[in-house]
Amino acid sequence: MYVGVDYYPEHWPEEMLEQDLDGIKELGANMIRMGEFAWHLMEPREGEFDFSFFDKVIQEAKKRQLSVMFGTPTATFPAWLAKLDPSILSKDEYGHPRAFGGRRQYCFNSDIYHRYASRITKELVKHYANEPAIVAWQIDNEFGHEGSDLCFCEQCHTKFQLYLEEKYGTVNELNERWGTIFWGQTYNDFAEIPLPTPTVTTHNPSLKLDYARFRSASLNRFAHDMTKIARDHHAAHQQVTTNVSGGFFDKWFDHAENVRPMDFVSYDNYPVWGGLTEPVSPAEIAMTHDFNRGLKNQNYWIVEELMGAQGHNVIGYLPRPDQAKMWSYQAFAHGCSNMLYFRWRGMTKGAEQFCFGIVDQDNRYGRKYQEVQAVFQDITSHESVVNAPITSDIAVVYDYDNIWSWKSQIQSSGFDFTNELLRLYTPFYKQNASIDVIPVNRAFDSYKILLVPALQMIDDELAARFKAFAEGGGTILFSFRAGLKDKDNNIYLSRTLPGAIAELAGIHIYETEALAASQSVPVVDAAGQNEICEGSVWRDLISPQTAQVMYRYNDSFYQDKAAMTKNKVGKGSVYYLGTGLGEDRLVPIAEEMLVHHQIWHKKTADGVEIARRSVNDETYVFLLNHTAEPQHIDHQTLAPFESKVVKWR
Ligand code: GAL
């Protein structure tokens, strides 16, 4: 098991190197990660390669038995390259080139950038192919992060038109499928097709979705080309990965496709960042881990785990003593198998002066150092627990096409895909059931419950897969807008909503209403036993056909319309949630499903999380206290923010 730190030796006076590496070793680390932003140091002038700085660092690391994850440096290119050919710079939606000076401001469709990036990747990997200390290559850094997945330059424009020509064959086919007859937008030639840059009102939704797919293809082609170069030149003992950043559902590329050629997934885990006064919810952090595990259906690494407060210009919340440690244990509980902390020491110069590390700028080994040391000492003694497989009976599914379709037409100002996914995920998380977060094209057969948030793109083939799953005894929970659109981002003609799953859900949508961020509607359970509650974000006014009503609306006009239904299908059941019901209403429904399928679950106090793992015939649990108060779980007491692995009864 690898545990370690992100170390940037080029940031510090050379005489600090040995002392730093001693400190890292003393911390209990066996790995350092470095190199991902150091292109200029490796190629100070065009074609002049010099790896001597890192040669020395690696020799010193080896003396201390520290292995290395080395990043290919293409996320930040040297200034000479931007000067040599400014066409490598990506452009924002207004056509302004992004200035040299930040990071990730290259265009994925620049052939020139591709050539230089390929060359440095090849030279670097070749230079260290026989280096036993380098056990993993990280390709680039956080693809697509900070808005770098979007570009509106001329190169992208031309390649977008070619992409469309390849996809549609003839411009007439494109006209037909995009519905360009609307507003007289019919094209005579692919060369007439615009990028979705600012216009009056809004662009055609099919154009916007194809542009999103093109962005994804552009980024992934670049990532895969760089990965191939590393693979062509690396040695057998070296694995290849890339690091996934947070906010993945807001990005413009398909992540499972991005990591397809990698040996393992790496994730950068920052439960709180610049400007946030509070960390994101425990459920949301958990979901991000389940997403990363789901990318390849295997355990993953964390190569940037937060320890200090972070922010570029505005600093975020300071993790309380033991809180960052607890987030580390939460990651291990959800399938992280190797962990590196960001970063060894906070930097005194440059854009990340306020991204604090294990050691602060005063260079004293204090509270955070001891916290990390405690994690390394303890977790390495539980390696078999950490590596024990995770199996889940529940999957929440997503589809990037669907997410981009929502992004191009948000429909309700209250809508956010991540929140809608969490609406269905959280009631199960709160009962500590294990959940996979997977792309919708994965096989469903190993699951008992499928959660399908806001999947407005459902075609007949996918509907047939859902049907087979339910008929075979599975339970499905759909939420609003299901089945609205086809793969071209158009609304189905002559189909009553929820379209291809209408019969499966046993309902018809009578009419629909978008609820703005500030709006809600009264909802009551069918038996009228519970108090009136609120539905938010959206309301599908449901006319049940074969389904039974669970909740209905309670305002005049719509008291006969359902807000949530349940339909029996073969041996299984299909639930449909027509409005944004709150967690208090969804937890008991989740419990009903868990009990029905005899899935292990356990209700715990708010902020207390438990995850089970079996090793041989023994059960171990991760116990996590996300709160600032002591908590009790069975016979165990957890101090504020305490986390531990214990053998279970
Ligand atoms: C990550 C990034 C690192 C560093 C860090 C600061 O997104 O990969 O290079 O910028 O954030 O918190």
Image (tube, grey):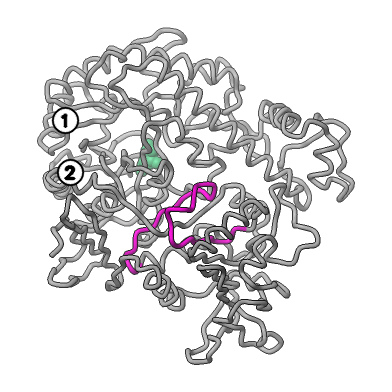
The amino acid pointed to by label 1 is Asp
Q: Is residue 278 magenta?
A: no
Q: Say if residue 476 shows up in the picture.
A: yes
Residue 91 sits above or below residue 416 on the image: above
Q: Residue 61, image x and y in percent?
A: 17, 23
In this picture, residue 641 sits left or right of residue 249: left
Q: Say if residue 366 shows up in the picture.
A: no
Question: Which element is circle 2 on?
Answer: helix
Q: Main secondary structure of the magenta part?
A: loop
Q: Residue 609, image x and y in percent?
A: 27, 64
Read off the residue under disc 2. 383
Occupied quadrant, residue 218: top right
Q: Residue at x 13, y 68 (%)?
A: 636
Task: Name the foreground residue: 334 vs 222.
Answer: 334
Read off the residue under disc 1. 20
The amino acid pointed to by label 2 is Glu
